[in-house]
């Protein structure tokens, strides 16, 4: 007992001396080290000649120093922006002569703080913003193509007290009403704008794990397309497997290909010779479905 009393006990870890840390649900790691005072006493750890002290850096406190005005105002604006983001929004989509119109409406009063203004824009339309009307959000966006329509709305809260100006932005999801058929396909078609991206999308859709291995061979024709190193699964094999095991994925890919073929730019996205292969794949799927 006397020997134990002369030992130094050192506790290292993340466990906190709180009810949650000791008896609650928190998970922490704590290591207990026992040793002689001449090896583990406080002077041997942080004394002027201690090896451990050589890796320590002095922490200079900053208490009592006034924070910059933009930080104080910024925190206040972020608090109000979180409150605004919790208010429900409704995005109503209607067809127009030249495209589509999307109106974003708020169902509750904003209660903006003094010297603050709110701008609203669609996530798909960078740089297009509309200030709210009155006490509720009311923003209209006209002449949209289908791929511009989105339930994701950007809220930008601006504050200017005369000496300091601060802006904070967040993205919220509105209830989308009147979502046109085929919008998802249009969004995908906008993103798939090169043959390389088309092959990557095909790999993703048909369940290939590593999309970074997509590569085009040096040969010509459909047999030159491979995924990964030489000898790995080619596009033909991948499509044949999908016909047998995942016909729904072939249907999804078919919608994209039909969409790309409607424009010259879209047709340029399809790799050379792919349509010949695709014709054979769709014929095989049609025969299989007809035999079931």
Image (spheres, grey):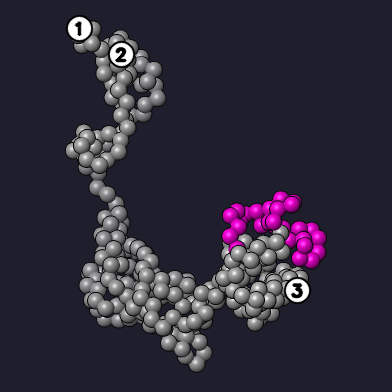
Look at discs 1 and 3 and give the one toward the viewer.
3
- Residue 229 relative to residue 129: left or right: right
Q: CA distance from mark 1 to mark 3?
A: 89 Å
Give the residue furthest to the top.
2
Q: Position of residue 107 (x, y in %)?
A: 26, 78
User: What element does badge 3 sit on?
Assistant: helix
Neighbourhood count class around disc 3 (C-alpha, 10 Å): few under 14, some 14–19, many 20 upward = few
Q: Secondary structure at mark 2?
A: strand
CB within 8 Å, label 1 to label 3: no
Q: Earlier in the sequence, mark 1 or mark 2?
A: 1
User: How far is mark 1 from mark 2, CA to CA?
Assistant: 14 Å
Residue 97: x, y in percent? 50, 92
Q: Is residue 218 magenta?
A: yes
On screen, residue 268 above or below 70: below
Quick one: 56 or 272, which is closer to the camera?
272
Q: Nearer the viewer, mark 1 or mark 2?
A: 1
Q: Position of residue 18 (x, y in %)?
A: 20, 37
Locate the C terminus and report the quarter of the image it occupies: bottom right
In the picture, measured across the screen, residue 23 lies left or right of residue 283, that is left
Q: Are marks 2 and 3 in contact (CB under 8 Å)?
A: no
Q: Residues within 10 Å of mark 2 (few under 14, many from 20)?
A: some
In magenta stretch: residue 133:
no
* Residue 276 numbered tag: 3
Q: Which residues are magenta?
A: 206-233
For label 1, the SS is: helix
Query: Which image quadrant for residue 241?
Result: bottom right
Residue 242's tag is none
Specify whether residue 130 is in view: no
Q: Which mark identifies residue 2?
A: 1
Residue ID for mark 2: 35
Residue reaching furthest right?
219
């Amino acid at each position: 007992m006397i020997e134990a009393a002369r030992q130094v006990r050192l506790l290292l870890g993340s466990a906190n001396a709180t009810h949650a840390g000791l008896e609650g649900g928190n998970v922490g790691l704590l290591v207990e080290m026992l040793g002689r005072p001449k090896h583990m006493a406080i002077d041997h750890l942080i004394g002027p000649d201690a090896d451990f002290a050589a890796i320590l850096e002095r922490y200079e406190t900053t208490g009592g120093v006034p924070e910059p005005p933009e930080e104080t105002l910024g925190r206040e604006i972020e608090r109000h922006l979180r409150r605004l983001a919790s208010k429900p929004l409704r995005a109503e989509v209607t067809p127009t002569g030249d495209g589509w119109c999307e109106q974003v409406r708020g169902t509750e009063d904003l209660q903006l703080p003094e010297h603050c203004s709110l701008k609203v824009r669609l996530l798909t339309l960078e740089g297009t913003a509309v200030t709210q009307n009155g006490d509720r959000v009311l923003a209209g966006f006209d002449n949209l193509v289908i791929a511009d329509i989105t339930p994701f709305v950007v809220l930008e809260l601006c504050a200017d007290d005369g000496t300091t100006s601060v802006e904070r932005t967040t993205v919220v999801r509105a209830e989308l009403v009147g979502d046109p058929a085929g919008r998802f396909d249009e969004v995908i078609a906008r993103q798939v704008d090169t043959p390389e991206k088309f092959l990557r999308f095909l790999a993703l859709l048909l369940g290939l794990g590593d999309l970074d291995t997509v590569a085009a061979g040096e040969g010509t024709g459909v047999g030159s397309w491979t995924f990964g190193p030489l000898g790995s699964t080619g596009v033909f094999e991948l499509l044949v497997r999908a016909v047998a095991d995942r016909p729904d994925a072939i249907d999804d890919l078919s919608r994209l290909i039909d969409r790309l073929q409607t424009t010259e730019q879209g047709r340029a996205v399809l790799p050379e010779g792919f349509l010949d292969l695709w014709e054979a794949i769709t014929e095989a799927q049609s025969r299989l479905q007809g035999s079931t």
